[in-house]
Amino acid sequence: EVAIYKERNAESLARYERACRVLPGGSTRATLYYPPFPVVIERGENNFLFDADGHKYLNFVGEYTAGLYGHNEEMLRDILSEIGKRGLMLSGPNIYEEKLADIICTRFQSISKVRFCNSGTEANLLALALARNATRKETALVFKGAYHGGFLTFGASGAPLNVPMKALIGAYNDVEGTRALIEKNKDELGAIIVEPMMGSGGCIAGDPVFLEMLRTAASEHDIVLIFDEVMTSRLSPGGLQEKLGIEPDLTSLGKYIGGGFSCGALGGRDELMSMFDLRRENGLSHAGTFNNNIASMIGGSIGLGKYFTGEACVSLNARGDKLRERLNEIAKEANTPVQVTGIGSVMNPHLGLETIKSPDDINHPNLQLFRMLMHLHMMNRGFYVASRGLITLNLKSTDDDIEAFEREFENFLQIYGAALC
Ligand code: PMP
């Protein structure tokens, strides 16, 4: 597969090598690197991507869940026409900021007020800063293998950058161990930050009992519970928290929330969020030139208001559930030890059949080989998938696209399945 890949992608390699002269590692996103070299993408159309060598791919990366809308020309026209009417860089509050905030506050039960920023990373940094100011406690409980952004990575590949709060690292889905850890450190813990489904860690669903325990312990000990729903908020109209029936104190959002433009948001309980109100004495200053930039505010309000409606969300995730079930059936029928985890439209295949409760359970001796083979096999046949295995559906994924993916996955297991056991 490596040889085929290299042969197919000569132009991408040339461009990648050229980019390495001026960009360390050829790009500004750690996520986008994979060996032997990543293909360079030229453009997108509906559910297709086209690379520098002229290949056409069905897009199952979906910009690591941010590309929820697919490449939707009509939506882009709607947004650009509105931006055209208003202009950029307006130097003041704008109506779309309020519109997007309204949509978010209406959808998410636990959110009564919102602050916008530029990325999911920033939303989480803001959440931690707010928790620290609110509790005057400086440590945050995080979970091994969690990803909360480029500066908030706990145990993924590559060395982590420094974290602005002291981090105490717990084990995901370990109810008793984590409860004890919280009890022991309750006087130092100002925040618990958790993904209700670990996304980058491998699409590992949080056990409702575990998440419920975090809710109870946080309330008991004056700790701010932060749900990082940057990836998971798309799984139900009111976020994964709605499905779970658990209300965090703060929720971080990002990815699709700006309609494809860069955007992050932090929302939560009035009492906490109102600490940003500058009409109050000692109101917290949260500044940022692009926080309310009109492109993201228009993009988000049109995206959520018109395209990713509640119904569209439910239907997309039902299709995702069906795909995941089907992939699991295919693996079983092919007699291969492969399971696909995830929720709704976001999923990840793994090697090994034991229940996966934390990223530590994913380590199979052939894991790297499995990932590399699956990735290059699918890429070489026109299916754009993430090197770590993440698969997402978007609003432009058709039933035919999904069926074609199922068939190629089956083909992959038939060719390589036996070798992977
Ligand atoms: N939190 C989670 C759960 C994420 O998946 C991501 C992005 N993959 C982030 C935070 C960071 O968001 P951004 O890339 O917009 O900074």
Image (spheres, helix red, strand yellow):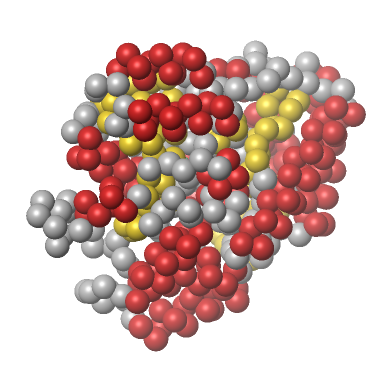
Q: Position of residue 46 (x, y in %)?
A: 66, 65
Quarter of the image for residue 207 reads top right
User: Residue visible at 35% across and 83% down?
Assistant: 86
Quadrant in which the C terminus appears = top right
The answer to whether 286 appears left or right of 118 in the picture is left
Q: Position of residue 84 (x, y in %)?
A: 41, 83
Q: Nearer the viewer, residue 95 or 85?
A: 95
User: Residue visible at 41% across and 54% down?
Assistant: 111
The answer to whether 389 appears left or right of 272 in the picture is right
From the viewer's perspective, is residue 203 above or below residue 62? above
From the viewer's perspective, is residue 177 above or below residue 234? above
Regarding residue 393, the answer to whether it shows in the image is yes
Q: Position of residue 24 (x, y in %)?
A: 36, 39
Which residue is most to the front?
Answer: 220
Quadrant in which the N terminus appears = top right
Regarding residue 152, the answer to whether it shows in the image is no
User: Residue visible at 68% across and 51% down?
Assistant: 317
User: Residue visible at 32% across and 47% down?
Assistant: 122
The answer to whether 168 appears left or right of 35 in the picture is left
Q: Position of residue 415 (x, y in %)?
A: 84, 29
Q: Nearer the viewer, residue 34 or 207?
A: 207
Q: Nearer the viewer, residue 111 or 408?
A: 111
